[in-house]
C-alpha cells in the first residue's frame, strides 16, 4: 500500500505533467494560428522602430551637448510630448483642425508607447478627426522615412567631400523625432 507521502508526490507529479501538457497544447495552438507570423512581424517592427527612435534621440542629445543625463532627456521628452498633446487639443477646440492634428502626430511620434496612445485617441476622438489623424500620421512617417534615406546619402556625400577638403566635423542641427 502507498504511504501518504507517496500519494502526495504522485499527485504533485501528475499535476505538473498536466500543467506542462496544457502549456504545450496552447503554445501549439498559438503558434499555428493563421495570423501568428504577421503579429510577430508587426511586433518586431514596432520594437525596432522604438529602438531606432531611442538611439536617434540619444545621438541628437549627445550632438547638442545635453546627452550626459538621461533623466533630464526623458523629462524634456515628456514635457515636449505633453506640450504637443495640449497644443493639439487646444488648436482643435479653436477650430484649427489641421494644425491640431499636426501637433497630435508629433506627440504620437514622441510617445514611448504609440500603440496605447492611438487606442486612447481612437476611443476619445470622433471618427471625423481620428481618420484624418491616421492619414496625417502615415504621411508624416512616409516623409520621415524618405527624408532619412535621403539625408543618409547626403550626409555620406557631405562627409566624404568635407573630409577631402577640411578635417573639421560637420555641424548637424538636431532633428526632433
Image: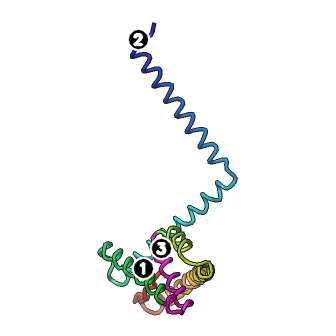
Q: Which is more N-terminal, label 1 or label 3?
A: 3
Report, in whole angstroms, how far the alpha carbon at label 1 lies from the one at label 2.
66 Å
Q: Secondary structure at mark 1?
A: helix
Q: Which residues are magenta?
A: 91-112
User: Of the residues under marks 3 and 2, which one precedes in the sequence?
Assistant: 2
Nearer the viewer's eye, disc 3 or disc 2?
2
Would you place residue 17 above or below residue 56 in this image? above
| Residue located at (40% from left, 84% from top) | 83
Numbered tag placed on residue 151 in the rendering: none
Q: Position of residue 111 (x, y in %)?
A: 46, 74
In the rendered image, the vertical position of residue 166 relative to residue 153, given as above or below: below
Residue at mark 1:
81
Q: Residue 53 shows which numbered tag?
A: 3
Residue 171: image quadrant is bottom left
Is residue 70 visible in the rendered structure shown here?
yes
Residue 139 is inside the magenta segment: no
Q: Nearer the viewer, residue 97 or 81?
A: 97
SS category of the residue bearing label 3 = helix
In terms of image quadrants, where is residue 150? bottom right
Position of residue 94 measured from the top left corner of the image (x, y, whole percent): 50, 92
**SS for callout 2:** loop
What residue is shown with label 2?
A: 3
Amino acid at each position: 500500500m502507498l504511504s501518504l507521502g507517496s500519494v502526495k508526490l504522485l499527485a504533485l507529479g501528475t499535476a505538473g505533467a498536466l500543467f506542462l501538457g496544457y502549456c504545450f497544447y496552447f503554445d501549439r495552438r498559438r503558434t499555428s494560428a493563421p495570423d501568428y507570423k504577421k503579429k510577430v512581424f508587426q511586433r518586431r517592427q514596432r520594437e525596432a522602430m522604438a529602438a531606432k527612435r531611442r538611439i536617434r534621440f540619444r545621438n541628437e542629445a549627445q550632438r547638442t551637448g545635453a546627452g550626459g543625463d538621461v533623466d533630464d532627456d526623458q523629462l524634456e521628452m515628456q514635457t515636449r510630448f505633453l506640450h504637443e498633446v495640449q497644443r493639439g487639443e487646444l488648436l482643435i477646440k479653436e477650430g484649427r483642425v489641421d494644425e491640431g492634428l499636426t501637433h497630435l502626430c508629433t506627440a504620437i511620434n514622441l510617445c514611448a508607447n504609440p500603440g496605447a496612445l492611438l487606442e486612447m485617441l481612437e476611443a476619445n476622438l470622433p471618427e471625423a478627426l481620428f481618420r484624418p489623424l491616421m492619414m496625417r500620421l502615415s504621411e508624416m512617417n512616409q516623409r520621415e522615412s524618405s527624408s532619412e534615406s535621403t539625408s543618409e546619402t547626403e550626409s555620406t556625400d557631405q562627409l566624404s567631400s568635407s573630409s577631402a577638403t577640411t578635417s573639421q566635423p560637420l555641424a548637424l542641427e538636431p532633428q526632433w523625432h
